[in-house]
Image (cartoon, grey):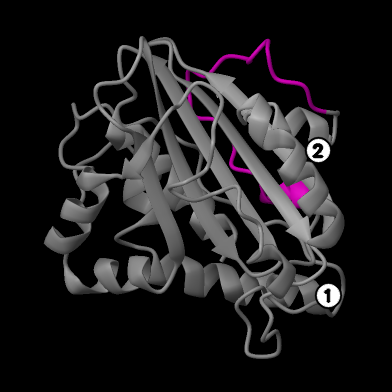
């Protein structure tokens, strides 16, 4: 009962605080958000965000009684639900509970980078990985990975989500200029929300090959989120920014 009341209160706070963010993001309406402007800008229709149930007595990730921002919900329950129109990703391997092996996750990286990352997992306190993937009718492929570490300190040591990450098929990553520009143009409350979240967004440097990759990195306490979107001809910034922000809110 205590957990239910805790989540009910959190949901009310979440709903009011995110009135200009989550609500506008999940619905394809005009709103002020990074990369999101008008109805025809390419955003996706996501289901309304739903916070997962916590074990009885467990604190919220951002609660005052949880200084390390530890997540006590099931890791798979923290994964973003695919948007309307999404189809399965036949090349993605995960268990029924979303469990992804380290070897499968490391397949996202260049072959010469995998051994070092694999070795790092042994020292960085990796506990588990959960993932979800989908494809959209326009060919955009999305993979969301959540990596849970023993503590936030271990998670911050993970080197696989940064501008110098060696992703498979993406030679050079640079900070996403659309994200930075959009953040500067937003109203103060949204800008403050984004600045207080450890979110980094990158894109494959142009000119790129036939397929472009976008990378989103979320530092959320003991959980690190790695979000990848790829599309032949170029991955659109709007649905990517939308996906990154919604996943960030689920981890808040």
In this rendering, the answer to whether 226 lies above or below 155 is: above
- From the viewer's perspective, is 72 left or right of 177? right
Q: Position of residue 244 (x, y in %)?
A: 45, 46
Quadrant (top left/top right/bottom left/bottom right) for the N terminus: bottom right
Quadrant (top left/top right/bottom left/bottom right) for the C terminus: bottom right
Q: Position of residue 137 (x, y in %)?
A: 43, 10
Which stretch did the figure color magenta?
A: 75-94
Residue at image mark 2:
102
Q: Residue at x 79, y 74 (%)?
A: 3
Instruction: Classify residue 167 by image quadrant.
Output: top right
In this rendering, the answer to whether 165 lies above or below 51 is: above
Label 2: how many Cα within 10 Å (few below 14, some 14–19, many 20+) = some
Residue at image mark 1:
1
Check contact, mark 2 vs mark 1: CB within 8 A: no
Q: Residue at x 84, y 80 (%)?
A: 57
Magenta span: helix, strand or loop, mainly?
A: loop
- From the viewer's perspective, is 117 left or right of 206? right
- Residue 90 in view of the camera: yes
Is residue 86 located in the magenta-colored stretch of the structure? Answer: yes
Task: For mark 2, give the secondary structure.
Answer: helix
């Amino acid at each position: 009962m205590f957990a239910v009341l805790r989540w009910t209160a959190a949901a009310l706070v979440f709903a009011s605080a995110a009135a200009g963010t989550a609500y506008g993001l999940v619905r394809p309406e005009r709103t002020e958000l990074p990369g999101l402007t008008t109805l025809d800008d390419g955003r996706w229709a996501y289901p309304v965000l739903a916070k997962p149930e916590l074990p009885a007595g467990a604190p919220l990730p951002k609660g005052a009684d949880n200084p390390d921002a530890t997540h006590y919900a099931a890791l798979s329950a923290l994964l973003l639900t695919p948007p309307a129109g999404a189809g399965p990703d036949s090349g993605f391997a995960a268990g029924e509970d979303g469990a992804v092996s380290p070897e499968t996750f490391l397949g996202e990286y260049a072959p010469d980078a995998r051994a070092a990352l694999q070795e790092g997992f042994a020292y960085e306190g990796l506990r588990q990985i959960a993932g979800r993937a989908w494809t959209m009718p326009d060919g955009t492929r999305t993979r969301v990975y959540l990596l849970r570490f023993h503590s936030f300190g271990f998670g911050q040591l993970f080197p696989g989500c940064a501008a110098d990450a060696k992703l498979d098929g993406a030679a050079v990553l640079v900070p996403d200029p659309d994200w930075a520009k959009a953040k500067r143009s937003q109203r103060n409350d949204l800008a403050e929300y984004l600045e207080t979240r450890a979110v980094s967004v990158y894109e494959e440097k142009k000119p790129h090959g036939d397929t472009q990759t976008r990378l989103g990195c979320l530092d959320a306490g003991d959980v690190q989120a790695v979000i990848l979107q790829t599309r032949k001809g170029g991955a659109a910034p709007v649905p990517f920014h939308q996906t990154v922000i919604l996943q960030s809110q689920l981890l808040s």
